């Protein structure tokens, strides 16, 4: 017999900054904290309403009102409620109920909603929306390096100073470090192995959200960007080395001319 319930809206946001969970706990005492570790907090608002906060900047809501979502995101971002969620990377899914577990584009079908199922859904969406943020930043860096690659192809040189080059390298390194620090583990939570249904749900979420492949794609893109920047840096170094050589040659010639003039006098 198919279980029929209303759809529950699930929304994940990435705040583009780390979240101090110790501060959150002291401010969220009015909500029931049902699960916690050093990297996340899971709150239960009602029987079918949850808030999940991940320390690397992801916040996920199941069946929460728009007012509560805006209030929480506004508090975490320190921005006005009316504009708190407008420009953040986000993922939205509808949770539906049936006698089978399925995950499809924009929909998660489960048999029932409990604390463990909510945890698995929200963890996967938290990872997915964080990856979306890193994909956006990586694409932005890649687009900028393409500009200089095209200049190099057309003119044989590019308009990039040493300071700009260092900034590019710094951004690339920081992005790689942030990904390594925040998303270095994509293992399933221990609770996923409690039952076959939980394991199936976790597997289907990871498969639908394409988490592992997207992470590998970001790493490959960053490696390509770094290779381009290394090449640009080598060209700049050669350019400045050549400039220094010419300066030295000109100085030597100047001294030679000066010596010849002095002798002729």
Image (spheres, rainbow, N blue to C red):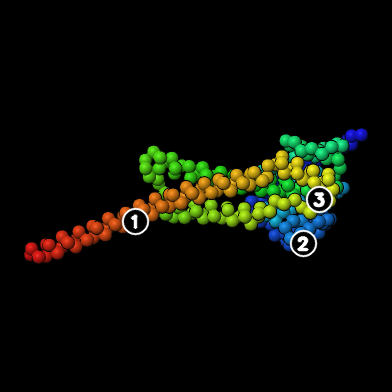
Q: Is residue 151 above or below residue 18?
A: above
Residue 173 visible at all: yes
Distance between mark 1 and mark 2 Cα atoms: 57 Å
> Which of the two discs, 1 and 3, sits closer to the camera?
3
Helix, strand or loop at disc 1?
A: helix
Q: Is residue 159 left or right of residue 61?
A: left
Which residue is the site of mark 3?
A: 193
* Numbered circle sitting on residue 258: none
Give me the residue at 23% from left, 57% from top.
Answer: 250
* Residue 53: percent from left, percent from top: 74, 53
Give me the residue at 40% from left, 45% from top.
Answer: 158
Whichever of labels 1 and 3 marks the residue nearer the N terminus, that label is 3
Task: Identify which residue, 130 or 27, lies in the foreground.
Answer: 130
Which residue is the site of mark 2?
A: 26
Which residue is the site of mark 1?
A: 241
Q: Considering the image in quadrants, where does the N terminus appear? A: top right
Task: Identify which residue, 186 or 106, lies in the foreground.
Answer: 186
Toward the top, the furthest residue is 1
Task: Identify which residue, 191 or 129, lies in the foreground.
Answer: 191
Q: Are marks 1 and 2 in contact (CB under 8 Å)?
A: no
Q: Is residue 141 left or right of residue 235?
A: right
Helix, strand or loop at disc 3?
A: helix
Q: Is residue 251 left or right of residue 152?
A: left
- The answer to which image quadrant residue 102 occupies is top right
Mark 3 is surrounded, within 10 Å at the Cα level, by few (under 14), some (14 to 19) or many (20 or more) other residues, namely few
* Residue 261: percent from left, percent from top: 11, 62
């Amino acid at each position: 017999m198919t279980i029929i319930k209303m759809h529950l809206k699930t929304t994940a946001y990435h705040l583009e900054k780390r979240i101090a969970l110790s501060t959150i706990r002291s401010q969220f005492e009015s909500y029931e904290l049902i699960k916690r570790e050093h990297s996340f907090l899971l709150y239960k608002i009602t029987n079918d309403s949850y808030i999940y906060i991940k320390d690397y900047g992801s916040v996920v809501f199941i069946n929460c009102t728009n007012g509560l979502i805006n209030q929480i995101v506004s508090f975490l971002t320190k921005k006005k409620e009316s504009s708190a969620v407008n420009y953040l990377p986000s993922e939205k899914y509808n949770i539906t109920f049936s006698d089978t577990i399925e995950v499809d584009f924009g929909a998660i079908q489960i048999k029932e909603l409990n604390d463990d199922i909510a945890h698995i859904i929200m963890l996967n969406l938290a990872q997915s929306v964080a990856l979306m943020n890193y994909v956006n930043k990586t694409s932005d860096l890649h687009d900028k390096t393409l500009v200089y690659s095209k200049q190099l192809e057309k003119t044989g040189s590019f308009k990039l100073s040493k300071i700009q080059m260092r900034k590019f390298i710094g951004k690339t390194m920081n992005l790689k470090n942030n990904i390594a620090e925040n998303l270095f583990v994509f293992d399933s939570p221990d609770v996923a192995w409690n039952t076959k249904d939980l394991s199936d749900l976790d597997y289907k979420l990871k498969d639908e959200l394409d988490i592992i492949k997207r992470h590998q794609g970001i790493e490959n893109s960053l490696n390509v960007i770094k290779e381009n920047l290394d090449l640009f840096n080598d060209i700049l170094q050669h350019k400045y080395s050549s400039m220094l050589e010419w300066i030295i040659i000109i100085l030597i010639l100047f001294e030679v001319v000066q010596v010849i003039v002095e002798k002729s006098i």
